[in-house]
Amino acid sequence: MATIRDVARLANVSMATVSNALNSSDRVSPELLARVRAAVEKLSYAPHAGARSLRKRSSGLLGLVVGDITNPFFSDLFEAVEDAAAANGYLVLLCNSSERSEREEAHLRMLRTQRIDGLILAPTGAASMHRAALLAQLEVPIVLVDRAMDGLGYDAVVLDNRKAGFEATSHLIARGHRRIGLINGPEIVRTAADRMHGYREALLSAGLPFDPALVRDAGFQERPAHDAFGELMALVEPPTAIFATNNLMTIGVVTALADRGLSCPEDISLVGIDDLPWADAVLPRLTAIAQPVRAMGETALTLLAERIAGTRLGPGTTTVLAPRLVVRRSCGSPVPLKAAHV
């Protein structure tokens, strides 16, 4: 089987000239192009498909790195991205960081070896020089989803998380609550930081003080949220309502309520983020902030496909999607503190 070296030798040109002639014919003179083509025809040379794919960066593979695949939000996001990718002729390699930066970095290094055409990333933390360098080494278009990172210049598709935090907290305030517990993720994650800001803005707008004792970082995880609820209930003045900023933590709170023989809204009120099917199926039916997760995934894929195709140029932009408050039956008026203090 003929090689590119054989073609170069027969045409009396360098291998780089052969490569240019085969991939960018306008980069060589007509005379050299004719010699290379004649040598290719005589030797029946066929470029290796994998090598050709590498040169043109057209593996047909996209990377998707999510924070926690056990979180139904990210499962739904993957489904949306995969459906949109298939419609555009791509396959998706799914990676789960488990909300751990070192695992995310390992996935990024692996994806570099897979010759992906582009990456959709839900980052585990804030931007840093180390992370910026690691992403730059991929040398492919990147779109951030769910969580933005300032200063890196990538396209991003996110929820208006400040508004989500504001609306959830304002709903509880409107029901008469003045001590509202916040069970949140780590503020190094932009999503958690913005939801915290929305929570504080709602308190400020209502003339209520911010009490750091009412805030717990449960790492976006179910069991830590369960424990955080217990800590809040052990306060001398426990909250009369809880705002849990993702679905796994909401599940943790619901489990903690059951463990203590409490119920919503008779003993305490609860608002969560992510309006998943179970939110309308459990008792009580949960009030929640709905995220347009399918639109988020589809928009991210569209932006990435445009970057890959070269039809979208210039600096990255951030697409902000609106949250929607879905009111059900898990919020009531405040109950006497001693009744909720278990």
Image: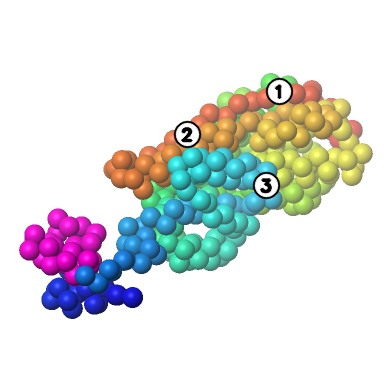
> Is residue 31 shown left or right of residue 73?
left
Which residues are drawn in magenta? 18-41
SS category of the residue bearing label 2:
strand
Q: Is residue 342 above or below residue 116?
A: above
> Where does the image place residue 170, in percent across and percent down from the top left?
64, 26
State the CA–CA distance, disc 2 to disc 3.
21 Å
> Is residue 307 shown left or right of residue 96?
left
Q: Is residue 290 above or below residue 231?
A: above
Q: Amino acid at mark 1?
A: Val
> Where does the image place residue 242, in percent across and percent down from the top left?
74, 36
First along the sequence among labels 1 and 3: 3
Instruction: Please name the colour scheme applied to the rendered image.
Output: rainbow
- At a point 19% along the width and 70% down the height, the residue shown is 39
Name the residue carrying label 3. Answer: 71
> Where does the image place residue 40, in percent across and percent down from the top left?
22, 67
Q: Is residue 263 above or below residue 313?
A: above
- At a point 29% along the width and 75% down the height, the residue shown is 3
- At a point 31% along the width and 66% down the height, the residue shown is 46
Find residue 41 and report its image quarter: bottom left
Q: Amino acid at mark 3?
A: Asn
